[in-house]
Image (cartoon, coloured by chain):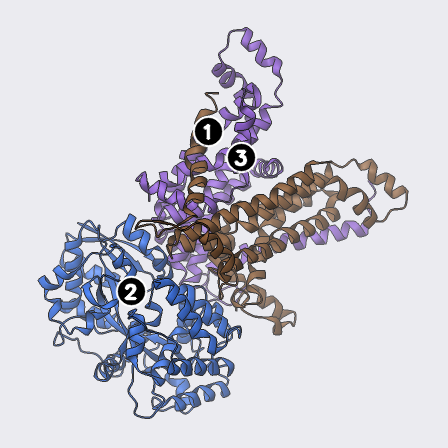
Amino acid sequence: MIVSTRERWLGRVLLVVLMLITIAPFISLFVTALHPPGTYPAGLSWPEDPHWGNFAEAFQSAQMGKLLTSSLLIELGVVPIALLIGTMAGFALGHLRPPGGKVIFLVFLLGLTLPFEGIIVPLYYQVRDLGLLNTRWAIILPLIALFMPFAVFWMRAHFINMPEDMSEAARIDGATTWQLFWRIHVPLSMPALSSLAILMFLWTWNQFLLAVVLVDDPTQRTMAGALGAFQGQWGTDIPLLCAGSLLILTPTLILFLVFQRQFVTALLQGSVKG
Amino acid sequence: MALVLPAAAFYSVFVLKSIASTIQYSFYDWNGVTAATFVGFDNYLEVFREDELAGSIVNAFELILFFSIIPVTLGLAAAATIRKFATSRMAMASRTVLFLPQIIPLVAAGIMWSWLLSTDGLVNQLLRAVGLGSLTRAWLGDFDTALPAVGVIGAWVLFGLCMLLLLAGMTKIDPSLYEAARIDGAGPFREFFSITLPSLRQEIGVCVTVTVIAALASFDIVYISTQGGPGNSTLVPGLEIYYLAFFQREIGTASALAVVLMLLVLAVVLPMQRLTRER
Amino acid sequence: MTLEAYIETGFPLPKALMDEFTAQYPNVTFNVREDQFAVITQNAPRVLADDPPDLMRLPQVSELAEDGLLLNLDGYAEAFGWDQWPATQLEQMRVDDEGRRGSGPLYAMGLNSSMTGVFYNKQQAAQIGMTEAPATLEEFDSYLQAAKDAGLVPIAQFNGGATGGLAFPLQNLMTSYGEATPINDWIFQKDGATIDTDTNLQAAQHLEKWIDAGYFAEDINSMDYSMMMSRFIGGQSTFIFDGDWESGNLDTQMAGNVGFFLMPSATEGGPQAAMSAPLTYGISASAANPDCAAFFLDWAATNEEARTIGVEIGGSRPMGPADAFMPEVDPDTVTAQTLAAGATIGEDNGAMDFIANATGSIYAKSWTPNLQKMVAGELAAEDLLPAVQADYESEIG
């Protein structure tokens, strides 16, 4: 392809500027985290005496260990179950196509654009009546339900493109529907499944509204919810707040850097299909 | 059919039932503790009559400009500019960087930006450095700039996603189309409007849908950065529902606003789906 | 035994008291959760009903009590003899069955009784020729102008987010022009009470004059409480309107350089009044350990160690009998000044609750947005009080 030098340079400069704008807030957060606790550092300035201890202090005072455990427990409660039942439904609706499946699918689709705020009020009373308020279940159960529209939609789109003949061959060999699903289709669907898993992991980790409304104790919340509580408690101390925020961001950042290809693909596909 | 059951059960119990309850609550006057009284459409009238509630809806629509229009147009421009070396090393590296705002919690974005936009923050520092000191202000505390400032945070979060989506779409366009256009003597602008834009209909539709929902249903960023202030100038429906339901304990009004919000999202998103799917 | 406590972040007093209590009674420990006051205000009904704490920092109590979320403390009051204390101490925490405050059963207790006024930076005051506290409002105005002329920031008052701190100077100005009683009636939701009175209008107009004259820092609409404290301590504000809960802190951080005065009256020698309210703590109606929590509240008011902590760390007069033990305080400290001012207010019968406490959401949903609008010139002083009164009436219906 013909690309003029001018265009090439313009493109490069533009990219660098965009990257700088994207990264600047992170740098500002980092630099501010190194200032003495309790001060209001002005703008972006390297402190004379960087307080690396802020990270240790924030780690302790934010009970980072407990927060991590809590978020992981919630992930463990949400992602495998949502993945399994979403895939089952997607398989049924996309591949087996039972009568009435179209209608059921449309009802699921309805939930795809649902803003969580729309149902947060009744969710609160429902969870309270179940006696689950302030437990991790208060986040886990509704979240599984809220992920269903996307999970079903995503997996159905995948299974609808799977060739019929493979299933027929298996049927002739006497496979039950479950065996067909578990032994043949699930192993073949790993790319779609892993993308879905990544997306649900991320959405759970970053879920804020449910955590704020349904769980008061930050050590029972998701990471985003814990960060909200952390701001409540440390909003009075900017450098510590910044240090704590960075710590809370670190696990996802590491995961992202390690699995960046999968993350990018999942997010891009996820939004195209969503 | 049994395979659909677990998913359908979760979905019905927590989502469908909750939607129904929201609609039900919206016709009652209820404080969450004592008995509720049926009030018909009063709560809806309140949503449209009270400045504070109606204003929150207007604010959400204003946010669309920042959450949606800016990231999509800028994303288009940027993607078109770097399209030609989309596979170069630098472009690949930029993917990682530009995606960062997508993976962090919105809460974190809110915290970072509140600090950047404060009186002594980086934004004002930069303005002073380039001699625009007179423009400096507390961006999130000023009636004229608070909502746009919240919008900028959203634009920052959503820009990378839009640009990369559009870029991915552009790399799928047949290069021979461009070759032909060049031979016809088309400049970059004509190239963009006659080839790139029409081919990206679906991707643009996706970007607009995702970002419009993000704007109308915004909560996290506003909750962290302004709590709706100053003077309700950044109040959005999501936050107002939260305040009404859990703080002022006007469950009925909160639910009416929730119903309006759900309908608004559908009203905006459904026609857009139509537009982009039809070819 | 572990008491579940939900307290306000940024104030060391409750934790200091709890530590001392655990030292004296090792079988009792505290599980503490902290939030900023605005968040506590938002969470209060939910937390009290669904996640009941034994001890909780309370916002305005009338609706919480009316809805049966708070434990009626009358039994404890009798058992511990709180009913023998000066009656005004507990008045603000009594709620009748229609949600009006001032009389009825007791639903909360104070960890101490705080009081507000004006703190100033002594060095900067000397620089602008202020050698003693202003005797009239006019004199105060002239010092504000002098500070402005000297290139200082006269007042960096927090007014951002959900906390409209201009309510402090506004209510102080109300007392300069008028009396405390009608304001208290309004706060206590007495029948027919209104905030929209002639003298209060004069106060609002005076506040507007200050805003227009540039006496407040430019960015107050985005300034939170802790930023105000940081600026004042760092010498970036000559005056602030604040309460004696900061006295201990300021004595440490600005030793010798900080003074306090009560808002002067509009006329020389006129009576002085101040917002003065207990640091209210309550017990959830469904708390697990109400007896122990009530014992703690009594202990905080009567134990000598606790009272010492209350004065030295809290900066305010503890609750309790009029003749109770008081620790020695260095007369040069601002703590001594605020304690003395508390006595003056007692003599002038000028104690008022805070106008932000009139209803559960009047602060966050009415005073705050309206005051922020006033700062930005979007709301005229004449329209402030009618707007707040309308919200007040729609809420108490």
Q: Position of residue A44 (x, y in %)?
A: 54, 64
Q: Residues within 10 Å of mark 3 (few under 14, many from 20)?
A: many
Label 1, on which residue?
A: B8
The mark closer to the camera, 3 or 1, is 1
Q: Is residue A41 visible?
A: yes
Amino acid carrying label 1: it is: Ala
Q: Position of residue C372 (x, y in %)?
A: 48, 70
Q: Position of residue C192 (x, y in %)?
A: 32, 72
Look at the image and give the colour of chain C: blue
Name the residue located 19 percent from the left edge and 74 percent from the top edge. Answer: C88
| Label disc, if present, on residue C318 of the rendered structure | none
Look at the image and give the colour of chain B: brown
User: Do callouts 3 and 2 point to residues on the same chain?
Assistant: no
| Label disc, if present, on residue C12 of the rendered structure | 2
Name the residue located 72 percent from the left edge and 42 percent from the top edge. Answer: B86
Which chain comes out purple in the rendered image?
Answer: A
State yes or no: discs 1 and 2 in contact (Cβ < 8 Å). Answer: no
Q: Secondary structure at mark 1?
A: helix
Considering depth in this image, is A115 or B125 the residue closer to the camera? A115
Horizontal arrangement in the rendering, residue A73 relative to residue B219 (left or right)? left
| Label disc, if present, on residue A150 of the rendered structure | 3
* Relative height, residue C2 to residue C230 (above, below): above
Whole-Å distance between the Cαs marked 3 and 1?
A: 13 Å
Q: Secondary structure at mark 2?
A: loop
The mark closer to the camera, 1 or 2, is 1
Horizontal arrangement in the rendering, residue B87 relative to residue C60 (left or right)? right
Amino acid carrying label 3: it is: Phe
Task: Name the image quarter holding the C terminus of chain A.
Answer: top right
